[in-house]
Every structure is written in C-alpha cells, then in structure tokens.
C-alpha cells in the first residue's frame, strides 16, 4: 500500500470556518450513572461533571468501563440507573437535542465500503439535515486531504485514509462534543501525529473532547484532564485545570503497526 | 427451610395429588362416551394441555414485553422457563391428538385449524429455544427471545384464522364425533375443568423449577463477577498474583 | 482555506445555520436516505439481487422435476411452489442485508444520527421489499413459461398479491435479521424463526394466486384481506419493537 502523505494540519481557524458558530463545546453532567449487563457491573454509580471545552482522556485497561461510559454518553446504550445531562450555551439540552451536536469516532470506521467517500458523507449530511451540504462536504474532503479520492470507493482506502474520512464524517455537522474510543488503534506513527494535530486544533477551537485510550503518548498528552477507570469505577481524576504531563513526556504513539 | 420453600413444597404436593386425582377422575368418574368409548378419555388431557399451553404462550409474550420495558434479566428467566414448559405441554397436545384421532377417524393427522396452529406454535417454541442455544451474548439473546415471543403471540391468531379460512376452501370429509367443548355432558365438563386445574398446577411447579434453575445460573455469574472484582485472578495452581495473605494469630 | 458560506461571525448565535430543523427527529427523511443508500449499494454490487434471483430460479426449476409441470395436478401445485421459492429466496436475502451494517459498525453511526430508530428499520424493509419484488418480477414470467399458465388477464390481481405477500415476508424478515445478526449459525436461525411466523402469508398468497390462475379466474377477496391484515399487524408490532430491540 502506497503511503499517502498526511495533509498539513487543519488549523483551528479551519475548524471554526467549517463548523459554524456551534463550536462552543457541550458540557456533560453524569448523575449516579450506572450500567449493568445482567450480573456484570460495567460501570458502577458514577457522578462526574465535564465542562465545555475540556479535553478529557479516559485511561484504563480493557473492561474498566471506558467504552461503556462513552456508549452511554453517545446514547448507544441506556443507563441502568442515573441520568446524563447535556449543557449547551442556552442551558440544559435533552439527550435527543444533544445528538445533533455529537460526533463519535470509534475503532470501527462506521463507513460504507461500497460507497464512495463523497456518498458516505452525503448520506450522513442527509441524516443530519445539513443545509448547503455540497460545499461543506467538499470543504471537509479537502481538509482531510481526500479531495482527489472523493469518487473512489472506501473499500480502496488505506487505514489512514479511512481514519481521516471517519473524522470528517464525525465533524460534518459541526458537533460541540466529540467522543473518541481508542482512536489510535491501528495507526502508525505518522497517523498518530496527524491525529494529535487534529485533536489539538479541535480543542483549541472550543470543542469538548472525551477520548478513551489505554496508552499514553502525544495524543493523550494533549488532554487537559485525565480520568482513570478500573473495574467500572473512577480511581483517579486530575480535575479540570491540571495538565497531564509536560509537553515532552511520552513522545510517540507506541504504534501497533510498524511504519512503512 | 425458608417459608417460600415450604410453600412451594406444599404446592408441589398439591399438584401431585391433584394430578393423581384427575387421573382417577378421568378413568373412573367420567362417563363412557357414546361412540368413542375408552379412547375418548385421552381428550381430557389433550384439551387441558392445549389450554395450559395457550396460557403459557401468553405468559411468555408478557415476560418478553416486560423484559423489553424494564430490562430486568428475571423476566428473561421467566420467559425461558415458560417457553420450555409450554413446549412440553404443546408436545403432549400434538402426541395425544393423533393417538385419539387414529382409532376414531382412521387418520393420524387432520389439517384442522386447531391442530395445525398448534403445530406452528410448537415450531415457534423450538425456534425460541434454538435462540437460547445459538446466541451467546446474554443481553442480545434476551432481547431476541422477547421480540420473537411477542411476534409469535401476535402471529398465532393470524395463523389460526388463515388456516380456518383455508380449510374452508378445501372441505374435508365430515367427521363424526364430538368436537371438544360442544354439547358436553356436565360430568365430563366437570372432569375437564378439574383436569385443567391439575395441569395448571403442574405448569406452575415446572415453571418455578425451571425459573429457579435459570436464576441460580444468573446469581452464580454475579457472585463469580464479584469475586473477580475483589481479588486478582487466580492462576492455574490457585495462586494469586497478590502477596499471600498470612492467616496469622494476633 | 475554505470559508464556510453560512458562517455567522457572531458567536452568540445558539442555533447552527448548518442544520435546518428543530430537535424533533423526523422519520421520513432518515427513512428515504437509508433506502436510497441501500439501493445505491445494491446497484453497485448487485450481490443480493443476482443471487436471490438465481436461487429462486433454481428452486422453481428443480420443483419441475419433482412435479411434472405438464400434468393437470401440477398446475394446481404450481402457485404453492412459486411462493415457497419466493419465501426461501427472500429468507436467504434478508440476512446479508443486515450483516452489511455490522462490518464497519455502520449501524452505530445510523443510531447516533438524530433519526428515529424505526427509520432504520423501515428504510431497510423498503429496500428488501424492492429487491424481493424485483426477483418476483423476474420469476413470474419463468413460471408462466414452465407451467403454461396464462396470466395476461389477471395481472392486476397478481401484482396485488405479490405486493401484499412480499410485504408480509420482508417486515418480520427484516426485524428478525436485525436481531439474529449476532447469532451463531445465523443463516439457519433466520429461516427457522421466520418460516413458522410466515405460515399465514404462504397460505393466503398461494390460495390467492391459485384462485387467479384457475379457470375461470376468481377474485381472491378474502385472501387479500388476510394478507393486508397480517401486513398491518406485523408492521405495527415491528414499529413498536424496533426501538427497544436496538438498545443496549
């Protein structure tokens, strides 16, 4: 597979321009949220507040509850107990309203292999009822460096390109809250660098970001707050003002794939 | 022994006695039927089982609905208990039917609406139980069973009506002999309802036994989960990775 | 750097100009978008259509060897065989349709979007309906040729039977395929779940087709009513169950 050069970093200004004025992040309040699957306690009663614009890293081993917390926040799962409230600039929003402003990037690409890049984005533009979709889609494809491949099937894309398209899809409707579930999985070091730059720009543009990861590295180093989970409960929370580490700690992404 | 166990022991005893009493009633109290004579006595068990299977069917659909609303695994346990018990009773109906039919009508099977619908129902219960085997994820399994149980419940009236209309299109030779429930001698009616009560009691006992089995499985899972949470995993020789706890004297 | 044409410089605007509607989740737009996506995928790959049509064709063909198509009795059995072929073909087609949503977890992406979950169900049901209908349109002429029946004067009735019958197959079919997507042996499990439930559809559709093909043709009023009734009941049950089905 030929390496596609990763595009130049999208600047915060670009994200602002592409998102419209809704880049003001959403805040989240978890009140005694609990999730059980039968006898298995995936998440014990947890109360937490995430402020708009925070970049939260969720750390923890597999099975610690990170994915569960993200899925609950994304409304893909319903809490067994407790409530999750979203706070927008105008006050509390219902879960349904929050879905309009929510973007999710998981380990799966959530893209249709048999459609072109453009068609994928068009589908989601229709689902999110975005006006002026054509120009927004073009702009996003350019920002992701995929403009020349817009009419190619996603099946033909490399892992890095799919990751960029996935991010473009998640950002299409200008979300104020982004959830990332282990986004560095399967990325090489160039991909990690790109992701770190994008996350940095998103954070600077005011978006609230929650990212789960089980490794440190430059991506995690950008977080303004770290929450560690174990067996479904929060064991450490650095709070909203502390930074995780000095900028030169944990350089490199510990890539799972050797760089080509 | 806890009070609930005592109650259930009593209920089981009652059910056993009732079934025995029903057996006695069927063979010695019920009058001999005019045309069919002795073989007709199977009709009591046949109809009682059919009515109980119908009640079970409703029970399974209700359990499914409650599961979907409340997401409490106990409703799923109740559902599978109901389905297995219902399958047993439905099998009784399907076996006693031909046994009764052959000497009377000379044929093993008739495509009459009731028997045919019962067979479709039997297939659906088997499908329900296959779901239990083939789906590993507990939650998805419970959801699928609940959905199927509800769909089946909604479907069976349609099946019955369609088959009844269909047989109307293809009339079969007129069958001599009483259809169950029509013009029944009062003693027979009494025996029938008595037998029905006995089968319902039996149903309750079987249901509870099966439910308890499922509940114990679920609770064992939970306990195992709690144990794993509290202590690190044991390796093959039973050693933990934590330093050994010395049981010492103070 | 591309400038967003609708960008309002005022940060205090709380409504996004990019999204056109309020926060209620509309059923129809999501439904249509998903249906269009299914059709587009199918046009590109043609996997489902081709395999379904060929399978149904093979079944009808094979039946001709078991039941001599020229004899008078076989002409009575014909409609039944046709509908069994449709039933089997439809059942086989339904599983891959939902499996597509599993490959890259696109189902999660659809559920995340602000559309009603029923839109996902109905969009896919509509797509499955179209595909099965296309298969039937291909099969009926073949059937006419093999079994030497004349359908020219009963085409409207036949079309109606096909429409209602197909709807009856795909509504429970789509919903069961959605939940069996995670089962072992799902290719066998789906038919096992579906076929008993579809008994009334098979009976009514076969009888209706037989009436239309009989000499002289009879209008199958009751059968059509049964089919329509079943369709409505299935649709209602599916609509209410789907939301809770996808929840975790």
Image: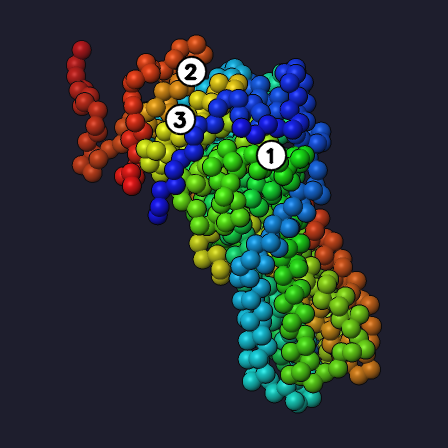
- Cβ–Cβ under 8 Å for marks 2 and 3: no
Left or right: C121 with respect to B205? Answer: right
The reply to whether residue B39 is visible in this rendering is no
Q: Earlier in the sequence, mark 2 or mark 3?
A: 3
Q: Nearer the viewer, residue A179 or A190?
A: A190
Dividing the image into 4 quarters, which one contains the N terminus of chain B? top left
- In front: A140, or B98? A140
- In the rendered image, which residue does mark 1 sit on? A136
| Residue A93 percent across, percent down from the top left | 64, 21
Name the residue: 60% across, 31% down. Answer: A173
Q: What SS does tag 1 mark?
A: helix
The residue lying furthest to the bottom in this view is: C71
**Image mark for residue C202:** none
Q: Residues within 10 Å of mark 3 (few under 14, many from 20)?
A: many
Mark 2 element type: loop
Q: Quadrant of residue A242?
A: top left
Q: Which residue is mark 3?
A: A196
Residues flagged by tags 1 and 2 on a common chain: yes
- Using the image, name the chain to which the residue with label 3 belongs: A
Number of other residues with Cα within 10 Å of mark 2, as a class: few under 14, some 14 to 19, many 20 or more: many
Q: Position of residue B117 (x, y in %)?
A: 65, 63
Q: CA distance from mark 2 to mark 3?
A: 14 Å
Q: Is residue C5 toward the left or the right of residue A63 in the image?
A: right
Most foreground residue, A51 or B247: A51
Label 1, label 2: how far apart the Cα atoms are: 30 Å
SS at mark 3 in the image: helix
Q: Give the mark nearer the N terminus: 1 vs 2.
A: 1
| C135 over B21 or under it: above or below | below
Q: Which residue is mark 2?
A: A224
Along the horizontal axis of the image, is C236 left or right of A161? right
| Rendered image quadrant of residue B42 | bottom right
């Amino acid at each position: 597979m030929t390496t596609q050069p990763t595009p130049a970093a999208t600047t915060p200004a670009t994200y602002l321009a592409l998102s419209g004025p809704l880049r003001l992040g959403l805040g989240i309040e978890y009140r005694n949220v609990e999730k059980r699957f039968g006898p298995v306690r995936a998440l014990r009663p947890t109360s937490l507040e995430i402020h708009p614009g925070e970049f939260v890293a969720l750390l923890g081993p597999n099975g610690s509850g990170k994915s569960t917390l993200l899925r609950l926040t994304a409304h893909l799962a319903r809490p067994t107990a407790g409530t999750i409230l979203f706070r927008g600039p105008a006050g509390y929003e219902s879960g349904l309203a929050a879905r309009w402003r929510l973007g999710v990037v998981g380990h799966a690409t959530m893209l249709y292999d048999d459609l072109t890049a453009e068609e994928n984005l068009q589908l989601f533009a229709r689902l999110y009822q975005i006006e002026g979709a054509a120009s927004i889609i073009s702009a996003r494809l350019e920002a992701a460096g995929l403009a020349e491949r817009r009419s190619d099937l996603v099946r033909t894309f490399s892992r890095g390109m799919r990751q960029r398209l996935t991010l473009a899809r998640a950002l299409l409707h200008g979300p104020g809250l982004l959830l990332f579930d282990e986004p560095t999985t399967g990325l090489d070091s160039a991909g990690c660098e790109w992701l770190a730059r994008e996350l940095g720009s998103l954070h600077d543009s005011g978006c609230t970001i929650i990212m789960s990861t089980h490794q440190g590295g430059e991506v995690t180093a950008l977080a303004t707050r770290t929450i560690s989970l174990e067996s479904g409960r929060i064991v450490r929370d650095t709070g909203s003002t502390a930074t995780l580490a000095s900028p030169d700690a944990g350089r490199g992404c510990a890539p799972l794939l050797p760089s080509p | 022994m806890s009070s609930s166990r005592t109650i259930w022991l009593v209920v089981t005893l009652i059910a056993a006695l009732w079934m025995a009493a029903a057996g006695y009633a069927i063979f010695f109290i019920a009058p001999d039927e005019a045309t069919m004579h002795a073989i007709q006595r199977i009709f009591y068990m046949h109809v009682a089982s059919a009515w109980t299977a119908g009640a079970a069917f409703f029970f399974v659909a209700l359990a499914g609905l409650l599961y979907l609303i409340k997401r409490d695994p106990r409703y799923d346990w109740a559902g599978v208990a109901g389905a297995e018990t219902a399958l047993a009773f439905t099998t009784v109906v399907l076996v006693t039917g031909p046994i009764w039919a052959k000497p009377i009508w000379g044929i093993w099977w008739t495509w009459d609406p009731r028997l045919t619908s019962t067979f479709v129902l039997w297939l659906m219960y088997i499908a329900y139980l296959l779901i239990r085997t083939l789906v590993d994820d507990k939650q998805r399994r419970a959801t699928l069973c609940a959905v199927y149980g509800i769909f089946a419940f909604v479907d069976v009236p349609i099946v019955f009506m369609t088959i009844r209309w269909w047989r109307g299109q293809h009339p079969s030779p007129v069958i001599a002999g009483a259809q169950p429930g029509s013009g029944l001698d009062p003693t027979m009616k009494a025996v029938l309802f008595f037998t029905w009560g006995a089968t319902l009691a039996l149903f309750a006992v079987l249901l509870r036994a099966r439910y308890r089995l499922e509940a114990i499985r679920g609770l064992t899972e939970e306990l195992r989960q709690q144990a794993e949470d509290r202590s690190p995993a044991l390796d093959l020789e039973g050693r933990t990775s934590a330093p050994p706890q010395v049981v010492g004297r103070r | 750097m591309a400038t967003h044409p609708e960008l309002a410089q005022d940060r205090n605007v709380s409504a996004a100009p990019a999204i056109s509607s309020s926060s209620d989740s509309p059923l129809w737009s999501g439904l249509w978008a998903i249906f269009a996506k299914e059709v587009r995928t199918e046009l590109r790959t043609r996997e489902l259509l081709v395999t379904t049509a060929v399978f149904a064709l093979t079944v009808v063909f094979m039946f001709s060897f078991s039941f001599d198509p020229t004899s008078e009795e076989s002409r009575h059995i014909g409609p039944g065989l046709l509908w069994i072929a449709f039933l089997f073909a439809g059942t086989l087609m339904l599983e891959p349709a939902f499996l597509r949503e599993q490959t890259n977890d696109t189902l999660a992406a659809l559920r995340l979007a602000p559309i009603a979950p029923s839109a996902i169900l109905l969009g896919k049901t509509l797509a499955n309906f179209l595909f099965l209908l296309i298969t039937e349109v291909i099969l009926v002429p073949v059937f006419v040729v093999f079994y030497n029946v004349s359908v020219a004067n009963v085409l409207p009735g036949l079309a109606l039977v096909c429409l209602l019958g197909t709807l009856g197959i795909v509504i429970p079919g789509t919903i069961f395929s959605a939940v069996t997507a995670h089962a072992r042996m799902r290719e066998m499990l789906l038919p096992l779940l579906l076929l008993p439930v579809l008994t009334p559809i098979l009976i009514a559709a076969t009888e209706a087709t037989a009436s239309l093909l009989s000499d002289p043709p009879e209008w199958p009023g009751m059968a059509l009513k049964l089919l329509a009734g079943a369709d409505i009941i299935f649709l209602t049950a599916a609509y209410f169950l789907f939301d809770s089905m996808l929840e975790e």
